[in-house]
Image (cartoon, helix red, strand yellow):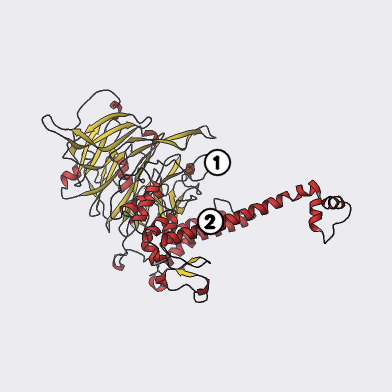
């Protein structure tokens, strides 16, 4: 009876301060509807807080049970710093709050097991905090659990000094990225990642698809999704699915021309078990070359070699009717055989002759370490860092050396030695120009420079290796038809992509008119990018970090510096014997000769690219010149674009 009158008096008058609860009950359905959202939020917040408290208490009880250490009712506190790094600041004032427990009191297996659930990036960051966590995070047990979590199907632990850590990092950093040149969307995308792949070692785009070789010798066939562009052309969108093409592969190659339209067949160097001879038991492992159709992945041809011959690399050179296969043995010898590609799809068997190449016949003391090829030339790098050339056509010979004086059309396999000041580590071979990187990280370019593809700041051909002085220590180098790309590391350990040469078709993103010097391209480079290549439609970058095979450059001795000394910190004008001053005077005269302000701005941008400046400094000057150019044209600065 007492409850009813209060319900009736509530709506009649203003609420009484002393009867707040009664008014709340008499407010009716409308008041409840207005306050439902707030009550629900407070109720959810209270439940989440209670759940968090229960979870903390449960974890404390488990920690006490596992470690066997008991604390007070206030709970246990774990030191946030390593005991070897000193006590925690303010520890004397907090003694009464609970027992301090060092991380080192936990069983090492427990700590490793907990750390193995962290992402790889967090494990690396935790290992950089102190000496104790560095040892724990670098243990092979941690990386074995991480590797099994990343690649559950990886049965073997791999090879090397740190097999589990190497395998885990390879599988964590693997990825194939691409950026299409045509179309409206110009952003970096990632293709599908095969779960069975043990890292990425090499890749090759063909006319319709992409092939990837991993570190376990499995060759994957990434089938692409083709879409129509705005211009009516068929463009590559992304690798939507994959299949295993073959196993036991060592290397693979296709048509060496830059245009993927010519890459009809894929040549795979692999190892296969062959049945033994009649009267013997067991089988022998023999190397062979298998030929697949790139469009369907069907094998159309196979060549098997004697079991005593072991190869490690294959390249192609020549036309389709006279395709020469060059095979590099483990001992550093070059063998070759000729195949007619137009007859590979015919169902017939014939014998091909394997012969020793002239570079190994005439120079038997040389041990070739690697080789590169294009349609009409081949380049060999020896284990001592020497470079030898084979040029098969007079036009390419003239572009590379500037003369036909030593060219012999009757002896096209005669190797020509290049004069270089240091040991060469790797190279890139284009159609009529090439790039070399020596042990000190210097880049040397040679050949045709009609579009500025040598990056020397001008368009003059070079008949001998010429150093690009403002670039050093590249990660990868690639030479195309009439442009060049360099993958380098910035001062903040980030990766950046530089390019020079012809910019038509979007092949130099951000520089449609091209550049005679290496400029920073508008491409977001993955952190672990290690190699790259470009086709007419796309730019590809392979991401895979191998802790055992990283290029290590030596410091250049002062006695080996050639030409103008390199700028160093603290070095004033006394070290410059007038070379930089004369160059600046020449730059000023070139700017003065330009008729309009627009031409002077463009010339200044080119000069900034020629100067031996850091990448950040060049970006600053280019951005400042763009701002000045827009202000002179009467265009407001406006918000920066994503590309800038």
Q: Position of residue 143 (x, y in %)?
A: 36, 54
Q: Residue at x 24, y 23 (%)?
A: 348
Mark 1 residue crowding within 10 angstroms, few (<14) / some (14–19) / many (20+): few
Circle nearer the viewer, 1 or 2:
2
Q: Quadrant of residue 457?
A: bottom left
Residue at the spot of label 2: 55
In this rendering, position of residue 110 left or right of residue 187 = left
Q: Nearer the viewer, residue 339 or 102?
A: 102
Q: Quadrant of residue 223?
A: top left
Q: Secondary structure at mark 2?
A: helix
In this rendering, position of residue 236 left or right of residue 52 = left
Q: Position of residue 371 (x, y in %)?
A: 27, 46
Q: For the view shown, which residue lies furthest in the bottom direction? A: 92
Q: Nearer the viewer, residue 621 or 159?
A: 159
* Image position of 580 with respect to 267: above or below: below
Q: For the view shown, which residue lies furthest in the right direction? A: 12
Residue at the spot of label 1: 184
Q: Position of residue 381 (x, y in %)?
A: 26, 50
Closer to the N terminus: mark 1 or mark 2? 2
Residue 451 appearing in the image? yes
CB within 8 Å, label 1 to label 2: no
CA gap, disc 1 and disc 2: 50 Å
In this rendering, position of residue 151 left or right of residue 227 = left
Q: Secondary structure at mark 1?
A: loop
Mark 2 residue crowding within 10 angstroms, few (<14) / some (14–19) / many (20+): few
* Image position of 565 with respect to 228: above or below: below
């Amino acid at each position: 009876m007492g409850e009813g009158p209060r319900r009736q008096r509530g709506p009649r008058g203003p609420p009484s301060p002393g009867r707040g609860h009664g008014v709340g009950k008499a407010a009716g359905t409308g008041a409840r509807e207005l306050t439902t959202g707030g009550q629900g939020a407070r109720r959810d917040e209270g439940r989440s807080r209670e759940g968090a408290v229960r979870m903390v208490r449960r974890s404390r009880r488990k920690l006490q049970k596992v470690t066997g250490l008991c604390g007070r009712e206030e709970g246990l506190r774990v030191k946030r710093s390593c005991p070897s790094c000193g006590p925690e600041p303010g520890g004397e004032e907090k003694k009464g709050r609970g027992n301090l427990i060092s991380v080192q009191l936990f069983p090492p297996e427990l700590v490793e097991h907990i750390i193995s659930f962290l992402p790889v990036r967090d494990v690396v960051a935790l290992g950089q905090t102190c000496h104790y966590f560095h040892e724990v995070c670098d243990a092979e047990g941690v990386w074995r659990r991480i590797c099994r979590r990343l690649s559950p199907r990886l049965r073997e632990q791999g090879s090397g000094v740190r097999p589990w850590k190497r395998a885990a990092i390879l599988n964590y950093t693997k990825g194939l990225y691409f950026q299409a040149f045509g179309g409206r969307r110009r952003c970096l995308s990632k293709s599908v990642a095969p779960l069975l792949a043990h890292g990425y070692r090499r890749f090759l785009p063909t006319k319709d698809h992409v092939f990837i070789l991993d570190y376990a010798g499995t060759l994957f066939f990434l089938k692409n999704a083709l879409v129509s562009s705005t211009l009516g052309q068929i463009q590559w969108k992304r690798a939507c699915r994959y299949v295993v093409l073959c196993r036991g592969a060592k290397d693979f190659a296709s048509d060496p021309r830059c245009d993927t339209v010519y890459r009809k067949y894929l040549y795979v160097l692999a190892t296969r078990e062959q049945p033994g001879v009649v009267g013997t038991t067991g089988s022998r492992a023999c190397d062979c070359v298998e030929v697949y159709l790139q469009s369907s992945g069907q094998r159309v041809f196979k060549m098997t070699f004697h079991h005593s011959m072991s190869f490690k690399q294959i390249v192609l050179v020549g036309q389709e009717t006279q395709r020469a296969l060059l095979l590099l043995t483990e001992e550093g010898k070059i063998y070759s055989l000729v195949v007619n590609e137009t007859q590979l799809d015919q169902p017939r068997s014939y014998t091909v002759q394997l012969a020793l190449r002239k570079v190994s016949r005439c120079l038997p003391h040389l041990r070739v370490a690697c080789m590169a090829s294009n349609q009409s030339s081949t380049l060999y790098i020896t284990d001592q860092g020497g470079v030898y050339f084979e040029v098969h056509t007079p036009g390419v010979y003239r572009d590379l050396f500037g003369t036909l004086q030593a060219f012999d059309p009757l002896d096209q396999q005669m190797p020509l030695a290049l004069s270089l000041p240091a040991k060469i580590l790797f190279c890139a071979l284009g159609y009529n120009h090439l790039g070399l990187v020596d042990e000190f990280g210097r880049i040397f370019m040679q050949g045709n420079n009609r579009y500025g593809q040598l990056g020397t700041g001008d368009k003059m051909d070079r008949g001998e290796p010429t150093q690009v002085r403002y670039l050093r220590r590249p990660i990868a180098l690639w030479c195309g038809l009439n442009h060049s790309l360099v993958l380098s590391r910035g001062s903040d350990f980030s990766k950046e992509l530089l390019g020079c040469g012809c910019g038509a078709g979007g092949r130099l993103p951000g520089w449609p008119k091209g550049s005679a010097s290496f400029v920073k391209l508008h491409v977001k480079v993955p952190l672990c990018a290690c190699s790259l290549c470009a086709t007419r439609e796309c730019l590809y970058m392979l991401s895979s970090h191998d802790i055992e095979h990283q290029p290590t450059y030596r410091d250049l001795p002062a006695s080996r510096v050639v030409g103008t000394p390199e700028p160093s910190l603290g070095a004033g004008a006394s070290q410059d014997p007038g070379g930089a001053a004369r160059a600046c005077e020449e730059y000023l005269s070139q700017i003065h000769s330009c008729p309009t302000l627009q031409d002077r701005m463009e010339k200044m941008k080119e000069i900034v690219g020629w100067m031996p400046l850091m990448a950040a400094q060049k970006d600053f000057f280019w951005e400042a010149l763009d701002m000045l150019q827009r202000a002179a044209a009467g265009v407001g600065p406006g918000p920066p674009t994503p590309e800038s």
